[in-house]
């Protein structure tokens, strides 16, 4: 892909993210009873759900130093891992599959840096908002990672707006949440690649999240009480199909496919 193609792809993603943010906030406010005092702060925050907004706490020195330290850490790790990927790995000519696996670490650091940047910026308001990434590497199950550790701003909105419709049918609710996640990621990165550049990677993100949904249901059904087995199973399900998500579209969007 040329530089202009990558730029157009990133513009698509930026616009799609902005529209998603607006839609998420609107649906969350419709689903929850929001007071007039809550509306301005919630609208200008990076949070997607009213439930997350209500978990904010007054900022103190310890919280500010913690956020600043996390920002500094990932501000170093991102360029280092990017350089290792592009300057060391890419010249070796690895396959797209291997490049997808290798992109897991730099992408994780990038998401952490982006999330921490937003948290730190919002600290100027005097409030500390919930962490978007709550030490996902400590997750002991698939359910724990997606539900409580990775992308908590998004998962909170999914619980409030999507899963809430299936409170009495948790299996359907789980499938609906992961189906929505897969389709949303397809629209963000795979659709523009297919429309504008005739590069067919459609279905990768949907397949990845379908596997995650099946993994969660399998954990709940067969691995209750088996902590070690559940831990090994969880990280196998999370990592082994990762190249489905870290496909040509995703790698192009984040600058790792040259």
Image (spheres, rainbow, N blue to C red):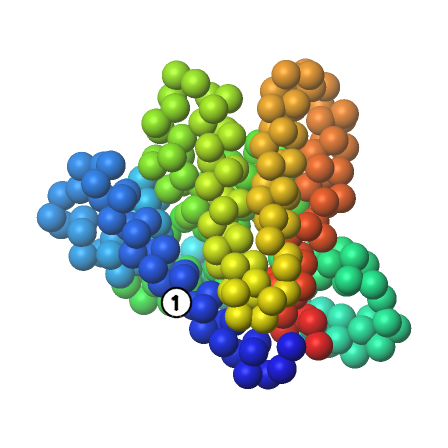
The correct choice, above or below, for 246 with respect to 148 in the image is: below
Residue ID for mark 1: 15
Q: Which secondary structure lies at badge 1?
A: helix
Q: Do we see residue 235 in this rendering?
A: yes
Q: Is residue 176 above or below residue 132?
A: above
Quadrant in which the N terminus is drawn: bottom right
- The residue drawn where x is 24% and y is 49% is 26
- Of all residues, the one furthest to the left in this rendering is 36
Q: Quadrant of the C terminus?
A: bottom right
Q: Is residue 23 left or right of residue 8?
A: left
In the figure, 47 relative to 258: above or below? above
Q: Is residue 71 left or right of residue 169?
A: right
Q: Is residue 107 visible?
A: no
Please name the residue shown 49% across and 76% down the image.
8
The front one of 51 and 207 is 207
What is the x, y in percent for residue 210? 60, 37
Q: How many marks?
A: 1
Circle 1 packing at 10 Å, graded few (<14), some (14-19), many (20+), is: few
Picture coordinates of residue 232, whole percent (x, y): 76, 32
Q: Quadrant of residue 55?
A: top left
Q: Which residue sits at x=13%, y=50%?
A: 37
- Left/right placement of residue 66 relative to residue 77 reads left
Q: Quadrant of residue 99?
A: bottom right
Horizontal and vertical percent for residue 54?
28, 42
Q: Residue at x 57, y 63 (%)?
A: 194
Nearer the observer, 184 or 82: 184
User: Looking at the picture, how far across and down is residue 197, in whole percent?
Assistant: 58, 71
């Amino acid at each position: 892909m040329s530089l202009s193609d990558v730029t157009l792809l990133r513009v698509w993603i930026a616009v799609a993210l902005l529209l998603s943010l607006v839609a998420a906030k609107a649906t969350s406010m419709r689903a929850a009873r929001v007071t007039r005092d809550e509306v301005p702060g919630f609208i200008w925050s990076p949070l997607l759900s009213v439930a997350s907004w209500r978990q904010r706490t007054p900022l103190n020195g310890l919280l500010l130093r913690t956020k600043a330290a996390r920002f500094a850490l990932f501000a170093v790790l991102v360029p280092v891992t990017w350089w290792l990927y592009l300057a060391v790995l890419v010249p070796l000519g690895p396959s797209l599959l291997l490049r997808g696996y290798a992109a897991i670490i730099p992408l994780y650091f990038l998401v952490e840096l982006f999330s921490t940047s937003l948290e730190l910026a919002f600290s100027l308001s005097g409030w500390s908002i919930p962490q978007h990434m709550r030490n996902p590497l400590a997750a002991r199950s698939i359910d724990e990672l997606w539900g409580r550790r990775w992308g908590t701003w998004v998962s909170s909105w999914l619980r409030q707006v999507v899963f809430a419709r299936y409170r009495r049918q948790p299996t359907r609710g789980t499938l609906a949440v992961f189906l929505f996640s897969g389709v949303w990621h397809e629209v963000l990165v795979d659709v523009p690649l297919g429309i504008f550049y005739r590069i067919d990677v459609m279905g990768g993100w949907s397949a990845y999240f379908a596997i995650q949904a099946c993994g969660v249901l399998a954990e709940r059904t067969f691995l209750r009480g088996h902590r070690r087995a559940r831990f090994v199973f969880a990280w196998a399900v999370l990592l082994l199909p990762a190249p489905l998500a870290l496909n040509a579209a995703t790698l192009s969007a984040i600058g790792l496919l040259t």
